[in-house]
Amino acid sequence: MLPYSFYKIVHILGIALTLVALGGMTVHALNGGLKLENAARKLLIAMHGAGVFLILLGGFGLLARIGFAHGSGFPLWLWVKLGLWASFAIVAAIPYRKPNAGRALLVALPTLAAAAAAMAVYKPT
Ligand code: HEM
């Protein structure tokens, strides 16, 4: 198995890719841009897809490295992180459907990322 530090870098690369992609879509839509008009559309979609995948890959690699066995129950902090991860995956559908939510999204996304980080750092129950 690969080392803990490797999975952490993969995890953080996934987070960075996801947030940059969602930010790019959101600002474009907020400025009145249509989906097909975004010059970086395909790149952003690819970055978002790769990002959410790498968050999960890195996350489960980290879990294995900190000693979680297959079949052991997930603690609450991990369920919260999985829920936040799912919202990072789904939220790509929002910018062009609700461009007016763009400003709120730009603030909410890094805040949710910090909440997910806090779950790993403090591991409440
Ligand atoms: C919303 C997406 C997520 C964000 C922004 C995020 C953020 C982070 C950050 C910043 C760290 C480093 C904390 C530290 O160095 O102490 C971390 C660690 C970790 N994350 Fe995530 N995470 C996310 C989703 C997930 C998911 C889905 C999983 C599980 C599949 C997961 C499992 C872990 C584990 C196991 C650690 C290491 C905990 C430890 O070292 O004790 N994360 N996460």
Image (tube, rainbow, N blue to C red):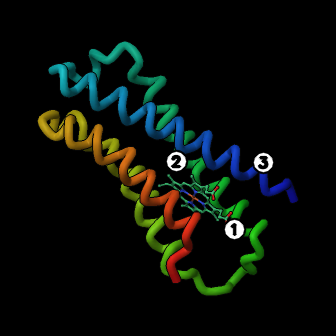
Gap in Å between the C-alphas at discs 3 and 1? 13 Å
Circle 2 Cα neighbour tier, 10 Å, few/some/many (<14 / 14–19 / ≥20)? many
Q: Residue at x 40, y 50 (%)?
A: 88
Q: Are marks 2 and 3 in contact (CB under 8 Å)?
A: no
Q: Nearer the viewer, residue 93 or 62?
A: 62
Q: How many marks?
A: 3
| Residue where numbered disc 2 is placed | 52
Could you tell me the amino acid type at mark 1? Answer: Leu
* Residue picked out by circle 3: 6
In the image: residue 55, left or right of residue 66: left
Q: Which residue is mark 1?
A: 63
Q: Is residue 22 above or below residue 37?
A: below
Looking at the rendered structure, the secondary structure element under dot 1 is helix
Within 10 Å of the Cα at label 3, are there few (<14), some (14-19), or many (20+) other Cα atoms? few
- Which quarter of the picture shows residue 56? bottom right
**Which quarter of the rendered image does ligand 1 occupy?**
bottom right
CA–CA distance in space, label 2 to label 3:
17 Å
- Residue 12 position, x and y percent, is 61, 44
Where, by quadrant of the figure, is residue 94 drawn? top left
Q: Nearer the viewer, residue 10 or 40?
A: 10
Three-letter code, disc 3? Phe
Left or right of 27 in this view: 121: right
Q: Quick one: label 3 or label 1, which is nearer the N terminus?
A: 3
Mark 3 and mark 1 residues within 8 Å of each other at the beta carbon: no
Q: Is mark 1 within 8 Å of ligand 1?
A: yes
Which quarter of the rendering shows the N terminus?
Answer: bottom right
Instruction: Work out whether residue 90 or residue 77 is closer to the camera in this orientation and state it.
Output: 77
Q: Residues within 10 Å of mark 1 (few under 14, many from 20)?
A: some
What numbered label is drawn on residue 40?
none
- Local secondary structure at mark 3: helix
Look at label 2 and name its amino acid.
Answer: Val
